[in-house]
Image (cartoon, rainbow, N blue to C red):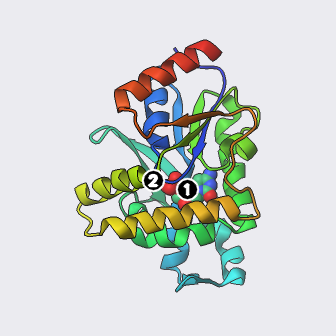
Amino acid sequence: MSLPFNIAIDGFSSCGKSTIAKSIAYKYKMRYVDTGAMYRAVTLYFMKKNIIVDKIVDFDLLLNSLNSISINFNYNSGTKNSETFLNGVNVENEIRGIDVSNNVSIISQVKQVREKLIAWQQEIGRHKNVVMDGRDIGTKVFPEAKIKLFVTARLEIRAKRRHDELIKNGNNISFNEVKKNINDRDMYDINRTVNPLKQAKDAILFDNSDLSINDQNALIEDLINNIR
Ligand code: DC
């Protein structure tokens, strides 16, 4: 069973949006798109080209090189994950590291970057049956989405989940560094002038601080079944 509409999932950093989105995509045979991965991949490109150095951006170079970037997602049947490719190269691990995390908020504030990525995202969603997660999906990318969730969880809990994941993937990083990065990114997301993170008027607020993944999945399934 696939769904003839799009689902928008927004919320704070590391609140489990992608876990929710992936489980919906699996259950309803929808396409899952992680827009954070797009912002991360673009950021990595600018870092590699020295277009952002020490958090200072060369805007002329950035604008000139926007059209040289292509991003694709390919499903890895081994890991059962969609992986991000930047100009044909698999960057899935690299874009999750702390260096990209520390620069992505700056790049995602640039209006022209957002316009380009939003146009790609809207094109992907044109035929519906897409579940997309990010910060502005319900407000800007798919304002017409039939189901919109705005996900949150307490900062300590989000930082712990993210820290555990980074350690599991072999990163050597302290809990406090992760917590600071998450909090800083939240502040950038809420306060930026272009498409800030905010709950769409018709989005359902979903706090998963005290929910297990199974309870969360069950609640979301009920919710979708009630709405569709
Ligand atoms: O979902 P994430 O934490 O991987 O996203 C990385 C960054 O990208 C996040 O700090 C804010 C930005 N982002 C955004 O501005 N708009 C989106 N739709 C998705 C992510």
Name the image quarter holding residue 78.
top left
Quarter of the picture containing the C terminus is: top right
Q: Eyeballing the image, is 112 above or below 140? A: below
3D distance between C-alphas at marks 1 and 2: 8 Å
Q: Is mark 1 within 8 Å of ligand 1?
A: yes
Tell me where residue 186 appears, x and y as whole percent: 57, 60
**Which residue sits at x=71%, y=74%?**
63
Q: Eyeballing the image, is 204 above or below 96? A: above
Name the image quarter holding residue 156.
bottom left
**Which residue sits at x=69%, y=63%?**
191
Q: Nearer the viewer, residue 169 or 207?
A: 207
User: On residue 38, which mark appears?
Assistant: 1
Tell me where residue 4 appears, x and y as whole percent: 65, 20
Q: Secondary structure at mark 2?
A: strand
Find out whether the residues at labels 1 and 2 contact each other: C-beta distance under 8 Å. yes
**Which residue sits at x=66%, y=77%?**
62
Q: Disc 2 designates what residue? A: 84
Mark 2: give few (<14), some (14-19) or many (20+) Cα within 10 Å.
many
